[in-house]
Amino acid sequence: YWERPDDLVLRQAYWRDPLSDVQGMLSSDLIAYYNGAVAEPGMIDPFVEDNLKPAAYELTLGPNFLLEGEEGVLTPERPWLELPPNSVVFVSMQERLVLPHYIVARFDLAIEFIYQGILLGTGPQVDPGFQGVLSCPLHNISNAPVHLQLGYPFAKIDFTKSRGLEAARSAGELDNVKTEEELYAAAAASQLGGEDGEPVKLINRNIRWRQPIYSTSYAGQKRVRSSLSELQGQITAFTGNISAFDEEIRRIRRFGYAGAIAIVLAVVTIVITLAELDRSYVDAKVGSVEKTQPKAAAQVQSATAVSRLQTEVAQLRREVTKLTLELRRKHP
């Protein structure tokens, strides 16, 4: 359906503006007028009156699409296209356009799909003289799938007048041009003067009537996918690793706290046990000395043993304090 129709007829109004005094954006009545004035079967084909808006025309979803690098075709039996979350899909329009050489168009997404989280490149421009079927990329940035139906209006296109050939028309340079081939021949011979004598440029006819989404047929382009979708997978994997790491930290901390308490208690127990042993040892030594030595000598021996025990207990306390601080540093 994207090929040039056999019954296409370009009228002289296609390059010679019959309403040259009208400038600016076209309203609905002017869109309808130019649709029938410039070409047969029309500037927009098919042209549906219900799709005509106050200053725009609604374009409907065509059959060809490219979803995450995979080609597809919508049919009346399978008319729904699903855009997964964080996906990129290239879609085509159902209408064929035949823009005259003095009208430039821009199209954008319908507001209802913008509210659903779909993005389209802002205002892609369609040059004067374009002929063919449009296509565009859509990006679903939401976290839910969005569905488009074959033939449903999903984009709006508006039209603005350009003064491209107005100087040549005013100078009478278009009076003898009967076909578009003659128009391009005159432009190639620099016989179409623009403002201040600058040459007028016409659209390259080699980019007309090409298959929609044609740019994706270039090497490697069929593998176009959403970078956000890949990033989401990486984030999910990273989140899983973080959760596992966090659980391991909690387990280590639980073990660490219990271990730290157990170690402190064990050290305290050892200190108390050593103190008791040393006390028993001193008592035994004092008794022995009292039996074998005079009372003065026994007092000296007892004082020496107690002093040594106090020194050892103080050292053990320093070790316990050091160990406790180290455990707090490792397991805050």
Image (spheres, rainbow, N blue to C red):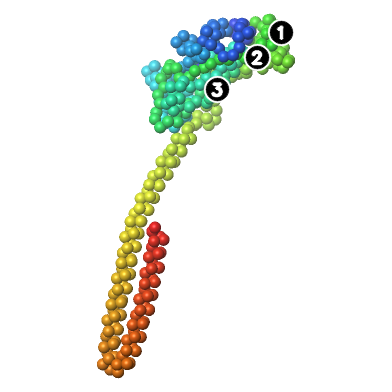
Check disc 3 and give the amino acid type. Pro
Check disc 1 and give the amino acid type. Ala
Between 24 and 73, which is closer to the camera in this rendering? 24
The percent position of residue 262, horizontal first and vertical second, equals 31, 64
First-in-chain label (1 vs 3)? 3
Check disc 2 and give the amino acid type. Gly
CA neighbours of label 1 inside 10 A, class few (<14), some (14 to 19), many (20+): few
Residue at the (36%, 72%) spot, across then down? 317
User: Is the residue under label 3 in contact with that under label 1 (CB below 8 Å)?
Assistant: no
Between 216 and 230, which is closer to the camera in this rendering? 230
Kindly tell me whether residue 125 is visible in this rendering: yes
Residue at the (57%, 21%) spot, across then down? 125
Quadrant containing the C terminus in the rendered view: bottom left
Please, is residue 135 above or below residue 35 in the view? Answer: below
The percent position of residue 14, horizontal first and vertical second, equals 60, 9
First-in-chain label (2 vs 1)? 2
- Answer left or right for 170 relative to 295: right
Distance of label 2 from label 3 (alpha carbons): 19 Å
Q: Which residue is mark 1?
A: 171
Q: Secondary structure at mark 3?
A: loop
Distance of label 2 from label 1 (alpha carbons): 13 Å
The percent position of residue 318, horizontal first and vertical second, equals 39, 71
Between 92 and 167, which is closer to the camera in this rendering? 167
Q: Which residue is mark 2?
A: 164
Residue at the (43%, 25%) spot, across then down? 115
Q: Secondary structure at mark 2?
A: loop
Please, is residue 174 above or below residue 58 in the view? Answer: above
CA neighbours of label 2 inside 10 A, class few (<14), some (14 to 19), many (20+): many
Q: Which numbered circle lies on residue 254?
A: none
Q: Which residue is mark 3?
A: 124
- Answer left or right for 294 relative to 238: left
First-in-chain label (2 vs 3)? 3
